[in-house]
Image: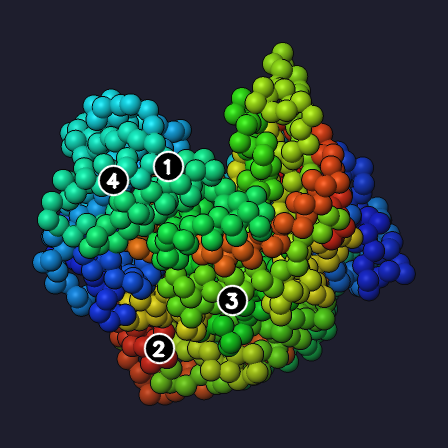
Amino acid sequence: MAFSCMRCSAGAGAGAVRRGAAATRAPAALSFVRCGLRRPAAAAAAKGVKAAMDAGVENPVRSAAPSKVENGLPSEITLDDFEDLNPLSENDESTVTITVVGASGDLAKKKIFPALFALYYEDCLPKHFTIFGYARSKMTDAELRNMVSRTLTCRIDKRENCNEKMEEFLKRCFYHSGQYDSEEHFRDLDKKLKQHEGSRVSNRLFYLSIPPNIFLDVVKCASVSASSVNGWTRVIVEKPFGRDSDSSAALTRGLKQYLVEDQIFRIDHYLGKELVENLSVLRFSNLVFEPLWSRQYIRNVQLIFSEDFGTEGRGGYFDRYGIIRDIMQNHLLQILALFAMETPISLEAEDIRNEKVKVLRSMKPLQLDDVVIGQYKSHTKGGTTYPGYIDDKTVPKDSLTPTFAAAALFINNARWDGVPFLMKAGKALHTKGAEIRVQFRHVPGNLYKRSFGTDLDTATNELVIRVQPDEAIYLKINNKIPGLGMRLDRSKLNLHYAARYSKEIPDAYERLLLDAIEGERRLFIRSDELDAAWELFTPLLKELEEKRIAPELYPYGSRGPVGAHYLAAKYNVRWGDLTTEHKA
Amino acid sequence: MAATGLRFRPGTVFPSHAANPSTQPYHHCSPQRMHAAKGRCRLKAQSSNGRPQISASSFRDVVIDGRQSEDGAPEQGGATVSITVVGASGDLAKKKIFPALFALFYEDCLPEHFTVFGYARSKMSDEELRNMISLTLTCRIDQRENCSDKMEQFLKRCFYQSGQYNSEEGFSELDRKLREKEAGKLPNRLFYLSIPPNIFVDVVRSASRTASSSSGWTRFIVEKPFGRDSESSGELTRSLKKYLDEEQIFRIDHYLGKELVENLSVLRFSNLVFEPLWSRNYIRNVQLIFSEDFGTEGRGGYFDNYGIIRDIMQNHLLQILALFAMETPVSLAAEDIRNEKVKVLRSMRKLRLDDVVVGQYKGHSKGGKSYPAYVDDPTVPSGSITPTFAAAAVFIDNARWDGVPFLMKAGKALHTRRAEIRVQFRRVPGNLYRRNIGADLDKATNELVLRVQPDEAIYLKINNKVPGLGMRLDSSELNLLYSERYRREIPDAYERLLLDAMEGERRLFIRSDELDAAWAIFTPVLRELEERRVAPELYPYGSRGPVGAHYLAANYNVRWGDISSDT
């Protein structure tokens, strides 16, 4: 199909430029292929790297295969401005080193190394790159490679030379053992890095895949003893970013002792999801959605996250945070901000993040009345017994930590005044998925009202963006059931990704790692964003803990506590995912 | 399942008849039957995903508002309806009318007492008529059960009467036979005129004088052509009105009976997301496209007299346009809708010659097979300049549509067969993604397509991101393909329209003032084309039509949505 091209493409021989390099020129500069040009960007170290999204994206090999044309229009929207195609020769002289701190951890094994390999396979990494694992345990390079190799896979559509590629990739992987708080050990790492970097401009990315209590130690040691001297040094930090406003601010202050804002990449992997990325495209590149995007037409918005498993013996970390901190305050709130923000001036990171902060700051801090919390209890079904949350050995017996929460939030600005934004997140539910549901108002003066019965709100339009699994976008519309009568029916105008796009959708970590390497900050959370996000949740979290509010228990594998329905009912909302008609 | 909704349900109260719910027109809607059969007309909804979209309980009132049954609504059980097909041996009667009547019968949509009469000049026995009809009857794919039984029963109700079209004698004979069948019940009579236009008035005169129902209603369904221009149409209307009231005249435009045309109003008025976009603020242009992939094939005699503009544009496409563009009617009652349609038609500019492109197909050889030109048809004069293709740009000078080009295109012997409405939206102002779209922002606009036939579908073209690490935009479709969602066969337009005529529902029939307004738009240009003997642009049989259509579109900064490799 016509979708062979991507951000990364092996055949970018036409001489595409690194984005960062291009961006230092005119804003019109396009790196028309994001990857696949084995030329690392020295200039990418420059500040103010251009936003990814204004980078045009076009596959040069595409000209060989004519694009599918729909409706007389090229179905792939192509670029016509290809200036800046001259490669920058000095780019050949730079290198990137990615150091995964906490290399033996779960996330590193399951997500980070595989994502790096996928980027490598797709020619998205610079020609010169090195990967270092850093952790306390003693391990040889070969042992690390062994460990990494077990989780590497090639995409279904890219099996070709898979083993060979893995081999080459593993050759670039090294290990260094050391304490997390030892400057000396990081100095040793620095020495090794220098060996690999040679005389090239060195860019260094540290991925901190470690518990939050040692964030600062590592940042301190790494920045003091292992920063790049002539290139950039960036640090990717994973959640949790504190437990509340105070601890988060303390963490930020700590980081900023050693790093400037531009070096900090707070990752929220939900922002790397394909359909979250697509949210802005839908809103801002289609005429038909934006006129509807306000309180005038939208009745409520629902952000729903569910997992169909519990903590499963790994509740130690979770119990300290709970579902509100783990999912709502970051993932769902970030999606909400993207959904609700005003049109940014451009697609550049700072412009987008400015708009997101404005949304967050327009929101009311969450009230206890507007929250329902739950915790799963054990449940026996078909002979299998599923454990309750407190049956988890890593969880204290009397834990009140919520594994489920529903909340109603409001944005007090001109666009959204009075529109409830309902969030719901839970573990051990009957289904797994993440989706955004937009329920529209009823048609004023509906001519067909007799066809709907008394509750016009049950037959309103609904736009659903299913983030995972089984990515899809659909709009529920009313139409006539074919036949001689006049019966109305709700059908979907549907775009099912699996049906339209046969290629595998890249993992969120791939996108985010690549962005960090390229200095694209759009999908990372800025310090002021984080502060604003905590401010919304901190008072509530404190109150929940101080009052020791007991969660409503719900059976493992159920639809969650019924309290969520009453919360919704309070705002005249009906959860779109829990109706009889909805079956995922 | 939400399967029991019905167009008519006893006990449903129409606003206009709230005081008198007993005016429910037909017996077949009896509750017993509804429970027995799956609804009056077996409106069995089948969602492809097997779930009811709106629960049955919300369908208490599933009825079109404003169903009229004002004239002669009988007491239940005491009424009968006779359908007389005048011109029973003709092609339309055989192919469409009798099969549609049978389908209605199969679906329990006909009243319990009904009689079907064929009337024509040729001598034929009842048996011969039944024989002839039975050749074209079919059961729907999903309703094969008892098919032969049902056919048998249906044919038993079919009779034949031969007579001249201008003879009152023939029709009084028919009247006698009808009375016999009606057997003292309240008689309602429907005449379907499936005859050439030159004898419309004769038949109407004779039939109305001698075979009108004495106590029930008498209605006449008339098929196009309704004249050739404003004058002849006005003349025809005046003649019809000598014998009939406006309420008795049912001018049929079978395109209005198509499922997706019916759905057009539902889409507009029962969804919040479309109506805000439905104006010059957001819509750049609207395209109404009709194409056939065959020519006149030896039957060009009638066509040559009319041409594609009269045959398709002035009626079918213009009617769809009016439905598309009308303001929200006060209610769904026929007169309210027709009032709004007339307003649209009367707001339209008269079509100018500059805004029309005409074409005619020529012979073409492809793969060893050669396809004849229009003028090769032996029934067509060899010097004919009758257009078999036309494209036109029309404008509605009202507040909603000022400046929005409505492009129509209709043709025979083209590369494809289809009818569709395409709505092209404006581009996004200040599009953030303009760099991803290239120089022509109009190439990446949203488009709503209603495909009327074949393969009924609704889809909205949207821009989205191609999955992957980059930021490439792609135009994909939010799609509703009817055949995937609704497994039942979609009824033929004639079924709906016949049923409507029997029920006195005039919504889908053309009122006299609508017809006048429609002719007023086209008559000047038709006359000019003929007076100046404007030669049509020739295009090969099976091609995409004359390129002139593109230049016409280009004049208004429009690009035809249908001509591309994909659709």
Q: Position of residue B465 (x, y in %)?
A: 37, 54
Label 3 marks a residue whose chain is: A
Q: Which picture quadrant has residue A555?
A: top right
Residue A99 in percent (x, y) is at: 28, 39
Q: Are marks 2 and 3 on the same chain?
A: no
Q: Picture coordinates of residue B307 (x, y %)?
A: 40, 72
Contact check, label 1 and label 2, Cβ < 8 Å: no
Mark 4 packing: few (<14 Cα in 10 Å), some, or many (20+)? some
CA–CA distance in space, label 4 to label 3: 46 Å
Q: How many numbered discs sit on the rendered protein?
A: 4
Are discs 4 and 1 located on one and the same chain?
yes
Tell me how far mark 2 sits from mark 3, CA to CA: 31 Å
> What is the C-alpha distance between the residues marked 1 and 3?
43 Å
Subunit that carries the residue with mark 4: A
Q: Quadrant of residue B526?
A: bottom left
* Tag 2 near tag 3, CB within 8 Å: no
Question: Would you place residue B233 above or below residue B188 in this image?
Answer: below
Tell me which amino acid carries mark 1.
Answer: Asp
In the rendered image, which residue does mark 3 sit on? A342
The quadrant of the image that shows the N terminus of chain B is top right
Residue drawn at point x = 81 percent, y = 52 percent? B12
Q: Residues within 10 Å of mark 1 (few under 14, many from 20)?
A: some
Give A81 or B73, whichever is nearer the viewer. A81
Is any part of residue B164 visible from this angle? no
Q: Give the residue at mark 2.
A: B557
User: From mark 1 to mark 2, how far is it between C-alphas?
Assistant: 67 Å
Secondary structure beneath dot 2 equals loop
Question: What is the CA distance from the residue labelled 4 to the residue labelled 2?
Answer: 66 Å
* Residue ID for mark 4: A187
- Closer to us: B452 or A384: A384
